[in-house]
C-alpha cells in the first residue's frame, strides 16, 4: 500500500511535468513550476539534514571513542571553519572572500595535486589492463597512440594533414561512438525512471 | 441546487476552456513522436511477449562466488556509489546513475549478508549515504540476518570529486571484492585504481560516456554506458523489469534504424528526417 501511494505520487508528478513539456497552459505551467520548486526545497532540506546527521555522528564517535577520533575532529573543525566563514555576521555567504580563500588556498591545490596523478595512474591502469586483457588493452593503447601522433605540434603540409586527420577522428568515429553511447544511455535512463515510477526494482524502498 | 447534468456541463465547459487556452509547445510531429515512444514503451511493459534471454552483464554471476571466497579468507568488500551523488551539483544523468547503483548495492549486500562478509560503502553525498544505509538494512531484512548488520557500514566521505578520489587512494587495501558503480568524472581512474586494483575480484560500472576507458582498463567486470541500467533489471527477479529492458532494446534498435534510414535519405538527397523529427 505504501509503495503504491509513493508510486502514485511519483506517477502524477511525472505526468504533470510531461504535460507541461508538451503543452503551453498557464495553470499547468504554474502547477509544474510549484512542483519543481518543492522538489528543489526537498532536496536542499535532505542535504542539510544529511550534513547535520554526519556532524552528529562524528560528535558521538568522539564522545564514545569509536571510529577515528582524529579524523572526526578534523572533519568537524573543517565544517566549523567553512560554516563560520560563510555564516558569520556581515559575511557574503559562499562568495565571501574568506570562504573563497579557503577554497582557493586549501581545496583547489589539494584537488589539483590529486588530479595531477592521473597520467601516472593511466599508465598503471594500462599495465594492469595488459595483465588481464592483453588484446583489448592493446587496441585501446594503439588508438591512444594514434591520437597522440595526430595531435603532434608539427607544422607544414604534414602538420596540416595530421590536424585534418585529428579533426576527422574527432568528428566521425569518436562522435559516432559517443552519440551511440548517449542514445543508449538516454533510453535506459527513461526506462529506469519508468521502472522506479512503477516500483519494479527491489530496492526502491 | 444544480443537478447532475449541470455539473457535467460545467465540467465539460471547464475542460473545453482549459484546452482552448492551451497550445502545442513542440508542434504536432514531435509531440506525436514523443507520445508514440511512450506508448510503445508502456505497451511493451504491460504486454510482455517473447522470451527474455539474460546475459551475464558485468560478470555479476561471479559475485556470489567472490563473496564466498572473501568470507573464507576473512576479507571485506568495498563499494563506492561513484562521485555524482543524488543532490550534488552534477548533471541529472550522472546523479541518476547513483539511483541505478542502489539496486546493484542491494544485490551485493544480500550476497554479503548471506556469506557473512562485512561491507564498506562509500559515497560523497549525504543523501546517497542515507539511501545506501536503507539499502543495506533492507538486504539484511530480506536475508533474515540482522545480527550481521553491524559489521557493515556506510561512510560519507565529504563534498567533491577530489575527496572521493583522495579517500580511495589513501585507503587502498586488499579487499575480497571491490565495486565502483555510479557517475564518475575526471577522477575515475584515481578512484578505480585506489579501490579496485588490489581487490581479488572487482566490478567497475559507469554510464558516464567520457569515462568508459577507466572501467575497461581496471575492472574484472565492467558495466559501460546503458549496461549500468540494464544490469539492474537483470538482477531483479521481476519479469516486468526484464521486459522493460527488452522494450529498451527494441527502442534502441528502432532509433538505430531511424538514424540509418535518415542518413541514407539525407545522403541520397531525400527529405531531412532529423529536422522533421526535431520540429525545426
Image (spheres, rainbow, N blue to C red):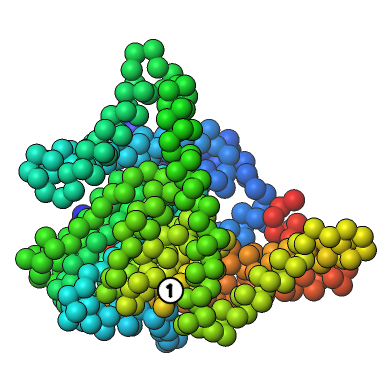
**Percent of width and height locating residue B51:** 42, 87
Q: Is residue A124 visible?
A: yes
The quadrant in which residue B273 appears is bottom right
Q: Would you say residue B271 is visible in this rendering?
A: no
Extreme residue toward the right, this view = A157
Give the image location of residue B231, x and y in percent: 40, 73
Neighbor class of circle 1 (other Cα within 10 Å; few <14, some 14-19, many 20+) is: many
Q: Mark 1 lies on which chain?
A: B
Q: Mark 1 points at which residue?
A: B219
Q: Quadrant of residue B111?
A: bottom left
In-front residue for pair B49/B127:
B127
Lateral position of residue A110 relative to residue A181, left or right: left
Question: Circle 1 — which element?
Answer: loop
Quadrant in which the N terminus of chain A is drawn:
bottom left
| Residue pictured at 75% horizontal, 68% vertical | A149
- Quadrant where the C terminus of chain A sits is bottom left
Q: Which residue is drawn at 32% across and 77% down?
A: B200
At x 26%, y 57%, the residue is B132
Amino acid at each position: 500500500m505504501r509503495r503504491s501511494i509513493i508510486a502514485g505520487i511519483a506517477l502524477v508528478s511525472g505526468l504533470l511535468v510531461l504535460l507541461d513539456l508538451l503543452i503551453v497552459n498557464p495553470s499547468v505551467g504554474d502547477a509544474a513550476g510549484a512542483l519543481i520548486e518543492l522538489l528543489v526545497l526537498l532536496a536542499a532540506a535532505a542535504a542539510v539534514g544529511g550534513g547535520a546527521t554526519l556532524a552528529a555522528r562524528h560528535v558521538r564517535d568522539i564522545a564514545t571513542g569509536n571510529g577515528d577520533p582524529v579524523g572526526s575532529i578534523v572533519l568537524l573543525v573543517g565544517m566549523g571553519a567553512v560554516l563560520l566563514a560563510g555564516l558569520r555576521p556581515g559575511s557574503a555567504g559562499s562568495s565571501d572572500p574568506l570562504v573563497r580563500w579557503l577554497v582557493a588556498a586549501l581545496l583547489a591545490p589539494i584537488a589539483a595535486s590529486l588530479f595531477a596523478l592521473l597520467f601516472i595512474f593511466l599508465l598503471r591502469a594500462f599495465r594492469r589492463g595488459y595483465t588481464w586483457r592483453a588484446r583489448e588493452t592493446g587496441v585501446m593503447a594503439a588508438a591512444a597512440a594514434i591520437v597522440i601522433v595526430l595531435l603532434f605540434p608539427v607544422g607544414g603540409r604534414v602538420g596540416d594533414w595530421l590536424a585534418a586527420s585529428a579533426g576527422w577522428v574527432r568528428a566521425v568515429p569518436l562522435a559516432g561512438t559517443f552519440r551511440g553511447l548517449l542514445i543508449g544511455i538516454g533510453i535506459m535512463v527513461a526506462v529506469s525512471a519508468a521502472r522506479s515510477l512503477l516500483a519494479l526494482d527491489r530496492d526502491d524502498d | 441546487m444544480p443537478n447532475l447534468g449541470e455539473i457535467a456541463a460545467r465540467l465539460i465547459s471547464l475542460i473545453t476552456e482549459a484546452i482552448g487556452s492551451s497550445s502545442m509547445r513542440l508542434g504536432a510531429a514531435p509531440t506525436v513522436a514523443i507520445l508514440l515512444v511512450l506508448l510503445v514503451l508502456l505497451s511493451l511493459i504491460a504486454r510482455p511477449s517473447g522470451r527474455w534471454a539474460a546475459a551475464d552483464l558485468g560478470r555479476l554471476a561471479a559475485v556470489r562466488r567472490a563473496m564466498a571466497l572473501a568470507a573464507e579468507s576473512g576479507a571485506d568488500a568495498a563499494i563506492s556509489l561513484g562521485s555524482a551523488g543524488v543532490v550534488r551539483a552534477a548533471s541529472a544523468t550522472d546523479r541518476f546513475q547513483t539511483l541505478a547503483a542502489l539496486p546493484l548495492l542491494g544485490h551485493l549486500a544480500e550476497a554479503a549478508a548471506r556469506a557473512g562478509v562485512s561491507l564498506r560503502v562509500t559515497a560523497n553525498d549525504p543523501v546517497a549515504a542515507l539511501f545506501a544505509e536503507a539499502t543495506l538494512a533492507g538486504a539484511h531484512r530480506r536475508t533474515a540476518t540482522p545480527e550481521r548488520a553491524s559489521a557493515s557500514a556506510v561512510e560519507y566521505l565529504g563534498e567533491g570529486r577530489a575527496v572521493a578520489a583522495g579517500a580511495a587512494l589513501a585507503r587502498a587495501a586488499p579487499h575480497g571484492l571491490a565495486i565502483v558503480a555510479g557517475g564518475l568524472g575526471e577522477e575515475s581512474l584515481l578512484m578505480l585504481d585506489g579501490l579496485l586494483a588490489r581487490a581479488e575480484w572487482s566490478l567497475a560500472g559507469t554510464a558516464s560516456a567520457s569515462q568508459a576507458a577507466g572501467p575497461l582498463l581496471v575492472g574484472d567486470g565492467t558495466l559501460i554506458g546503458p549496461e549500468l541500467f540494464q544490469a539492474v533489471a537483470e538482477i531483479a527477479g521481476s519479469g516486468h523489469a526484464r521486459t522493460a529492458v527488452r522494450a529498451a532494446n527494441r527502442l534502441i534498435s528502432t532509433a538505430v534504424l531511424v538514424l540509418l534510414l535518415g542518413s541514407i535519405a539525407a545522403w541520397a538527397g531525400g527529405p531531412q528526417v532529423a529536422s522533421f523529427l526535431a520540429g525545426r
